[in-house]
Amino acid sequence: MFDTSGKMLRANFEAQTRQSFANLAEILGRENAQLSDIVTMMVHIADTRYVDRFIELRHEFFTVDSLPASTLITTTGFAKPEMLIEITPIAVIGESRAIIHHDLP
């Protein structure tokens, strides 16, 4: 995973988490939506040591009122060894209730 300047975020769980949410916000923005439109998300992390830190970090992006339902799963590895987190959200957007589903490493 890379930051916005193209720098590799290797072995940096916090940076990868923040960048994943930033990427997601950008994708949702293309549809005039925002993170609060996410209704559920499945999060895979590479190590159980990151559980508490992920819970803390997601509060930087969601208020108590907009916190989506979520599942947090520890996995033994990803397709790219430097990846530490993957977020798969589902958002419900607008009156048409269109659903956006997007996997984000």
Image (cartoon, helix red, strand yellow):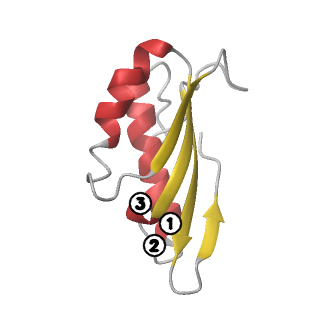
Point 26% across, 54% down: residue? 63
Amino acid type, residue under disc 1 in the picture: Leu
Q: Is residue 23 above or below residue 42?
A: below
The residue where tag 1 is placed is: 28
Q: Is residue 38 left or right of residue 61?
A: right
Q: Is residue 101 above or below residue 95?
A: above
Q: Is residue 72 above or below residue 32?
A: above
Of callouts 3 and 1, the N-terminal one? 1
Amino acid type, residue under disc 2 in the picture: Ala
Q: Mark 1–mark 2 contact, CB under 8 Å?
A: yes
Of callouts 1 and 2, the N-terminal one? 1
- Where's residue 12, x and y in %? 42, 22
Marker disc for residue 84: none
Q: CA distance from mark 1 to mark 2?
A: 5 Å
Q: Is residue 10 above or below residue 49?
A: below
Marker disc for residue 33: 2
Where is residue 99, by image quadrant? bottom right
Q: CA distance from mark 3 to mark 1?
A: 7 Å
Q: Is residue 56 left or right of residue 98?
A: left
Where is residue 90, by image quadrant? bottom right
Q: Which numbered mark, 3 or 1, is in the foreground of this view?
A: 3
Marker disc for residue 35: 3
Point 48% across, 14% down: residue? 48
Q: Mark 3–mark 1 contact, CB under 8 Å?
A: yes
Amino acid type, residue under disc 3 in the picture: Leu
